[in-house]
Image (cartoon, coloured by chain):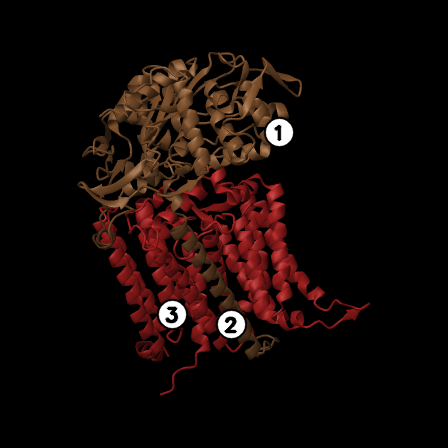
Chain colours: A brown, B red
Amino acid sequence: MSCRTMAPMLAPRRFERRVGAAGNAALIAALVFFATLAYWQVFRADLAVHAGNPRILASFNDPGRGAILARDGTVLARSRPDGTREYTSTIFAHAIGYLDARYGTQGTELAFNDVLTGQAGGTFDDAVNAELTRRAREGLDVRLTLDPKLQAVAAAALGDRRGAVIAIDPRNGEVLAMANVPAYDPATIATDGAALLADERSPLLNRATQGNYPPGSTFKTVTAISALENHIITPETMVTCPGEIVIDGFPISCRNTAQGVGTYTFKDAYARSVNAIFAQVGVSLGWGFLTRTAEALGFGGAVDFTIETAPTQLHAPGSAESQVLLATTAFGQGELLATPLQMAMVAAAVANGGVLATPHLGLSAGKGGKTSLNLAPGGSRRVISPSVAETMRQFMVAAVGDSQAAGISIPGVTVAGKTGTAEAGSGTAHAWFIAFAPAEAPTIAIAVIVEHGGQGGAVAAPVAGQVLRAALAP
Amino acid sequence: MALRAASEGLTARERNIELVLLAGSAGFILLAWRALDTAGFVMPAGSGRIVTQFLSMALFGHFALRLVAPRAAAQPYATALLLVAVGLAFVTRLAPGVAQDQVNWVSLGVVVMVVAAAASRWYPLLRASTYTAALAAIVLLVLTGLFGDTINGARLWITVAGQSVQTTEAIKLFMLLFLAGYLASEADVLAASRIRLAGRTYGTLPYLIPLGGAVFAAVAALALLKDLGSIALLLLLAMAMLYVATGRLRFVAGGLVLLAATGVAGYFLFGHVQDRVDTWLDPFADPGGSGYQATQSLYAIQAGGVTGEGLGLGEPDVIPAAPTDYIFSAVAEELGLAGAVGLVLLYVVLLFAGLRVAMGVENDYGRLLASGVVLLIAIQAAVIIAGNLQLIPTTGITLPFVSYGGSSIVVNFLLLGLLLGVSHSAAPPRQG
C-alpha cells in the first residue's frame, strides 16, 4: 500500500481510555441537557403566562375555555361555541382584561390562563384522561372576588369622571370592587385597539392598580403610623403652628386647612390635616424610619397582586434625600407616587388591626358549580403594631368626624377615613379618599381617586360613601 | 465470492440484531402517524406513501448491508433510522409540504450509505487523500464565498444544477478525512515532545503547523461566510480528535481558547453574531424582534412539560425555522421532557456504538475515522441542542438525521456508511 505501516501506533489501552473519556464527556453533556430541559419544562411555568406566548392566544379561541364569574356566580366573560369571547358588562373590563394577537394580553384572562384552559387545577384523573385520549382538557371556570353589586355602584358613582375605586375586604384581602373610568369593551379590542392606545384618556390603563398619582394627605396616615411606631410623638402631644414652619429655608404653611394655626394635639393635626405639622414630624422621623414604614406597607415596589401593578415610589430614583423633600413627602406631596390599590392597602392594614392580608382577585375555580381549586393566595403579615393600628383607627374616625368628608354618613355605622387633595402639576388637584367601615369591626376598606376632581372631602368621599352604603346597607 | 458474501449475510448475527432493532423505527413512524391522525392533524397528500417509502428504504438498507457489510455493528444503522423516523414525523408535522422531499432525501441517503459502506471495505485507500481533502474543503469554501447564496445572514449555499447545496456539510466530511489521516500519521509525534531549546520544548510545533494551518484556513473562510455554527463544529471536532489521538488535554484547552477567541472576534466583527449573542444573553429583552426565535423556542419547550402536549397538539410551528434549526424544541414541546431526553439518549447510543467500533479496529487510521464520524455527529447534535436550550448562542446548523434538509441527510448517511464499512472490515469473519 504505502511506506507507512498500518500497525497501530496508538497504544490500544491508551486509545481505549481516551475513547472512554470522550464517552464520559458526552454523558456529562447529556446530563447537562437533561437538567436544562427540566429547568425549562418543569420550573419555568411562568413562561406559560408570558404575554408574548402565542399558546395563550390559541387557548383563548378555544370554545372549551372556562368562564370568568363574579363572586356570586354572575357570568362576566364566557366563550361562545365558535370560540369568541362574550362579556356581560364593560365595567369589569380591567379586571377581566383581554387577549389579542396585536394588542397583547392582560388582566385575569392572562393571570388565570392556565386554569381557564384546564392545564392547571384539574384532577389527576383529568390529566391521565387528557394524556390517554389526546383531547384538549376542558377549562375550569374562574370565580373572582368581585361583588357585581358593589362594582356597579362604584362605576356609577364615578360616572364619567376619570378615576378609580378599589374596595378590599380587610379581613382576607379579597378585592370586592375595582372600577375604572374610562373603561373599554374587551369584545372589540381587535378593531378598537389602535384607537384605545392613541386615546389620551388612556382607557386601557387599569388606574386602580397601574395608575400612579401623588397620594396627597391620605399619605399622612403612613407618616402618622411611622411617627407613632417609632415613638416620635404621641396622639396627645401638643403641637403648635404659628402660621408656617420653615424647613431648611423652605416655608410650609399650616393654612392649607381651616383650623391649622394654633396649638392642638397631634391627633387633631391628623384630623385637620395640617401640612406644616406633618412636615415637622417627618423631619423628626428622618428618611430611615419613614422609608421602613412605607416599604412595609408596600411602597417603593410593585405590589404583589393577581394582575400587573405599577411600582410606586417614595421619591424619584436618584433624588437626593433632602430635608425639604422629606418634609413635603411627609404630608403626601414631594415626589410620592401611589396607586389606588396601594392606598387601599394602607386603609385595610389599619382596619385589620395592623395585619395586611394579601390583596387578590381570584377566589376559586371549578366546573359546573363545583369548586376544585382555591385561587386565594392566602397569607398575611403584620405591618403595624396592634396598639398603633388601634390609635390610627381612632385618628381616622376623628378625621371623618371632623366633617372634612362629605356624603359618607351611614345611619348606625361609624366610618373611618382620610381625605386627600393632591396637587397635580398646574391642573385641578386630584381628589382622594381612603376609608374603612364599620370602624369597630371593618368589613370593607376603600380607596377612591377622581383625577383633577378637586377637594378630596367634597369629591372623592361621596363616591366612597355610595360604595360603603351599598356594602353595609342591611 | 459473491455467493459466500450472500450466505454470510443471511446468517450475520449483527444484521439479525439490526433487524430486530429496526422494528423500533417502524413502530415509531406508525405510532406517530396514528397520533397525528388522532390529534386531528390534516395529513399532507400522499402521507401513506411517505410511510411506505420510509419502511421500504429501511428494509432495503438493511438487506443491502447484509450483502456489502454483513459483519458491521448492528446499532449505528438502527439508531440512525430511529432518529430519521422522529425527524420525518416532525418534518411532516411542522412543514407538511416538504415531507415527501424529506423522505426522498432519506431514500437517497440510504443508497449513498450502502455505496459508502461497500466502498469503505477499502477505506485505507482514503488515507492517500488526506491533504487532497483539506485542499478540497478550502476550495469548496472559496467557491461558496464567490458563488454562494446568502440565506439568513450567512453564505452557506451553492446552487448546483438548480439544487441548493449546503457546502458546509461536504466541508465537514473533508475535514474529517483530513484530521483522521493527518493524526494517524502524526499522533505519536504530537503526543511526544522531544526537542528542548533554552529550557523550552519545541518538538511538537513544526508538526502542528499543517494541522493548525488547515483548521485555521477553514475557520477563517467560514468566518468570512459568517457561519458561526460550522466554525464551532469544526473546532470542537478538531479538539476531540486531537485528544483521542494524542491524549493531550492541552490541545483541548487550546481549542477552547481558540473557540472563545473566534467567538469574541465574531462578536465585534459581525453584526449578526453580535445580535445572536445579545439575544442569547437576554432573549426576553426584545421578544417581538431579535429575541423572537429564541423566546418562541423557550415557550415551546416550556409548554411540553414532562410528557409533552402530544404529537400534533402543540404549536411548535410558530418558531421560525422550526423544521431545520429548532426541531429539537418542537420535539421537546410535543413529546415533552421524556421525548427530548430520549432523543438525546439516541445520540449517546450512536456515539457509544461508534466508539465501540473504533476500539475494535486494528489500525490508527480506521480508529480515528470511526471515532471521528460519531464524534462529528454527536458534537453537531450537542451544539444545536445546546443552542435550542439557550445554553449557548443559537447557531444555524442541523440536528443530524432529524432536521429537514437534503445536504445534511445525505452527508450524515455517507458518514454512517463509512463507519459501517470500517466496522465490517474490523470484525473477524465468523468461524464455521
The residue located at (73%, 69%) in the rendering is B203
From the viewer's side, name the closer residue of B314 and B213. B314
Q: Chain of mark 3?
A: B
Q: Position of residue B111 (x, y in %)?
A: 37, 61
Q: Is residue A88 above or below residue B133?
A: above
Q: Residue furthest right?
A: B198
Q: CA distance from mark 1 to mark 3?
A: 72 Å
Q: Which residue is mark 1?
A: A321
Q: Is residue B51 left or right of residue B369?
A: left
Any part of residue A447 in sight? no
Q: CA distance from mark 1 to mark 2?
A: 64 Å
Q: Amino acid at mark 2?
A: Gly
Q: Which residue is mark 2?
A: A20
The quadrant in which the N terminus of chain A is found is bottom right
| Disc 3: CA contacts within 10 A as few (<14), some (14-19) or many (>=20) | many
Which secondary structure, mark 3? helix
Q: Position of residue B352 (x, y in %)?
A: 45, 69
Q: Amino acid at mark 3?
A: Gln
Tell us which disc is closer to us: 1 or 2.
Answer: 1
Q: Amino acid at mark 1?
A: Glu
Mark with earlier residue (1, 2): 2
Tell us which disc is closer to us: 2 or 3.
Answer: 2
| Disc 2: CA contacts within 10 A as few (<14), some (14-19) or many (>=20) | some
From the viewer's side, name the closer residue of A55 and B257. A55
Q: CA distance from mark 2 to mark 3?
A: 18 Å
Q: Chain of mark 2?
A: A
Q: Position of residue B404 (x, y in %)?
A: 38, 50
Which secondary structure, mark 1? loop
Q: Is residue A82 above or below residue A464?
A: below
Q: Which residue is mark 3?
A: B75
Q: Based on the displayed image, in which of its 4 quarters is residue A323 positioned?
A: top right
